[in-house]
Image (cartoon, coloured by chain):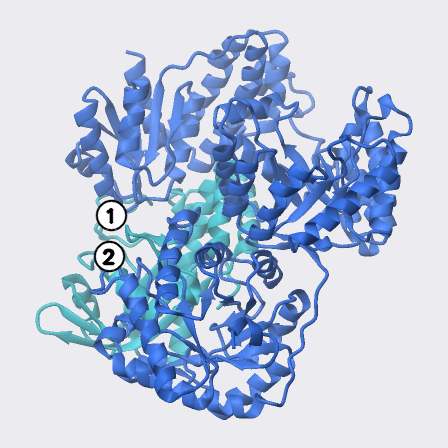
Chain colours: A blue, B cyan
Amino acid sequence: MNFKDVLGKKILFFDGAMGTMLQDKGLSTTEMPEQWNFTHAQAVLDIHKGYLAAGCHIIKTNTFGANKYKLAQASYGVKETIEQGVNIAKRAIKETNKEAYVALDIGALGKLMQPLGELSFDEAYKAFKEMVCAGVTAGAELILIETMSDTYETKAAVLAAKENSDLPVIVTMIFDEEGRLLTGGDIAAAVAMLEGLRVDALGFNCGFGPQQMLNILPDLVACTSLPIVINPNAGLPAVVNGKTIFAATPAEFAQAALQLAKGGAMVLGGCCGTTPEHLKQTIELCLGEVTPKQVKKDLTVVSSYGRAVCFKEKPLIIGERINPTGKPMLKQALREDDMTYIFKEALAQQEGGAHILDVNVGLPEINETKMLEKVILGLQGITDLPLQIDTSSARAMERAMRIYNGKPLINSVNGKKESMEEIFPLVQKYGGVVICLTLDENGIPETAAERIKIAEKIIKKADEYGIEKKDLIFDTLTMTISTGSQNGLVTLKAMQHVKNVLRAHTVLGVSNISFGLPQRENVNAAFFAMALADGLSAGIINPLSKQMMQVYDSFCVLAAHDEQCRNYIAKYSVQDASAAGVGQNAPGQPSPTQEDRLFNAVVKGLAQNAAQATEKLLQTKDALAIVDEDIISALDYIGKGFEAKTIFLPQLLMSAEAAKAAFEKIKTALSKKGSKREAKGTIVLATVKGDVHDIGKNIVKVLLENYGFNVIDLGKDVDPHLVAETVLANNIAVVGLSALMTTTVVSMEETIKLLKKVAPGCRVMVGGAVLTQKYADMIGADFYSKDAMGAVRYAESLFTK
Amino acid sequence: MTTKINIKKEEVLRYLGYGGKAADTATQKLMEEVLLEAAEVFDSKSIYQVFPCILQAGNIILLGDMKIVSDDLYKNLTGCKKAILMAVTLGQKWDKLARRYAITNLAKAAIFQAVGAATIEQVCDDLEEQIKKEHGFFWQKLRPRFSPGYGDFSLKYQKDIFKILECEKRIGLSLTEGYMMVPAKSITAIIGIADEKEKKQQQNCNGCTQEQCIFGGDRGKTIN
């Protein structure tokens, strides 16, 4: 029988540990277990046979670490190791004459994914693909992706399995006692992503024993509709004389396994420390004792690497601010590739109370597919809010859904045939919750009834792709009230019907209602309140708008979504207390001039005050004069103090940030006049290849910018060739390189050598914890900067000659 | 294994280069904020094993399945029949907060860097205490932690350490091609367990090979 036909129909049993068994037979802890497929094939075969004799239905091939990274130094390649592994397992089944399935065993790659680590999503995918293809050729009957602790790596593995085979895919991950992955994700987030990717079964393995897994099993049962697989260790590990021992006896293990089966597990087996005896007793105890059951869950969930956000009764806030429409600053940031601006917007919205962030980076003059990928990857490194991918380009959408770490919200599909045929296959493949706009080939219907009809059509069509209603959210479209007095009511009427009759979730972009009216926020806030009262599931709004958030927070109190008004009180009882007292003067003292105020604000590192003082000063004083006479003199005061060791790094940086806030105001004022602050020169900064510690470089960057230099920041882990190319392309005279580790100073030297070859006139300054003057001289640097101010002084000496 | 932690502010200032001087109130306040936010993401994970330690002629050390060639480590482990192999990480959440600070507030980013250094040292110290208790090393002396990259103890041995301790799987710590650990705030080390009772030795800078001290200390002198 086909594995898919038995999965979920009856209780099935995986085998137990391979690694532990091999270690018992003499495998060293520094050796690759997969090498034994060649050197000790008989031992591997015997272990498989032991498990088959115990009655296991599925045996895992000895290929857990057979990926190109772990096998880099081994004498056998990925393909042959996997083929050999599958063949041994098949031989064991044949020779024992048992009915059992061979699972291609795929473990984690042992490399951390970007942005934290070095492995890109595409590289991970490629490594897994190599394993999958070898396993398929050799005749594996299912694919087990196991011992995963990162949802992102898991997604790469699942896509590799799905796109390169028709085999059933099972995923088991390691969670801790609190139900969290090492990467911080919880069970609900992992399940949302895996179900979206259409795996066949999922569950836990490794980490700890069956007893502890029993504690977190209810969390899994609560959120998955798929068969649950559990492969625990034989209890908790203990180290005795340098050897890892697992404490649970076969009888104890079997008893706990029975509880797992009763608790909802449909496939059971073992991980580290389990033996054929553990499995034998488990099978004897559990077989026939339990009939597996499977309950379908009707949850609407989106997820990020770290959290799941579930659409329930309490409405959600979708932050709308990362969208260039009508936002000149964001447009400029996108054109200039200024990621920091975008990231700040994201973090500010999270702070403001957003649950999900909309991401739209479409501008005619930029490559949207590339930009969307870049922004999403960046956001995944700093926020754990799920993202709403917002693009009208199918190409950009597919790429974004592919590299997204979790189950995204998709913005959007509509009732047009073309739209549905474009978006639904993507959702079917990558998973996601889709916002459905109730418009079609004939435009936006004027009546609620017609919009509802389109919603019904979309539900039907989605079903053809196996996309359930729970993964659709309807937007009944906010039309501008100034063009038709019924517009608000029509939208709400359609929305109520979707919510109450079609029983689907709803979303609205609220602010369109007030287009063309004065003081738009008044109308927006009222419409938002009406929509919330009518049962809106989520509003796409500006979480930085005080008025909108007041409506939301008040609604939550009034609609019983804020127990004992706790959130409301916490948020609103302290407000405005901080506004007083800043920049105040002691009574009796002469009031300081605006110049003094700015100087003091920068010296004290008060960003808000610095910005305010600059704004005021701009009314009476020329912008460039403010820069030269006031801001720079404050910076110099601080810089000298830093050099004299009376002022320390945190103060230097607070002042730098305050100066930056002042410069923002200057920049705005100048750009209004069509002019700008002339840069003293352009400097390229990079943290060298292999090094990811970039704080020093970031500090130097801010200081250089404050002192009027234009900085091209190449980031961290930068290839020497990229530095050289940038220098040549922009005719750069000064480069700053940073390295933190002794090992990466080698890359620094390599970069300097290359620069000296291709651009002999270019000066190179270096800095970083392990560097010294002597070291800098040795690797051919022109200047060694012992701290951030040193870099500024050197740059000034070069450019003011 | 997650434990709560108490970070000494003086340690943080020391890492920031204050060299015993007091911080101004603005810095103090910022540091308080950072410490609160750091406590929220603090989720350290550690793993260790105790191995018999065999010193062979010359400079060869056998530790479990590992064979290490290093004069400096040999010196450090002389007199030890056992040694601890350990790995500690402050985890991914810690790195993510560092990344957020780098975007929102550079002063906080610098302070957080120092908080990280102080925190991981504290976590290592706590782990040593825990190991002493668990293994009943009451009268033995633990040698100063010795990490790959110290002296002539090559970073290449990180690969073996990672395999033996199963760092990726157990504590989510991984090694890049360039032998850099991710998450960044992580430590691996060998700690010799000296057989005989020795007089209490101060943690000092004698093993340090840096030519200039970023904390304002002199070589050969102890900074505390």
**Of A92 and A364, the residue lying toward us:** A92
Say which element carries label 1: helix
Chain of residue at mark 1 = A
Q: Where is residue A45 in the image (x, y as percent from the top left)?
A: 31, 82
Image quarter of residue A9: bottom right
The crowding category of the residue bearing disc 2, from other C-alpha atoms within 10 Å (few below 14, some 14 to 19, many at least 20), is some
Q: Where is residue B139 in the image (x, y as percent from the top left)?
A: 32, 80
At a point 31% along the width and 68% down the height, the residue shown is A83
Q: Name the residue under label 1.
A: A743
Height in image: B197 above or below A467? Answer: below
Quadrant placement of the C terminus of chain A: top left
Height in image: B107 above or below A405? Answer: above
Say which element carries label 2: helix
Q: Name the residue under label 2.
A: B155
Image quarter of residue B123: bottom left
What's under tag 1, amino acid-wise? Thr
What's under tag 2, amino acid-wise? Leu
User: In this rendering, would A23 be left or right of A187?
Assistant: left
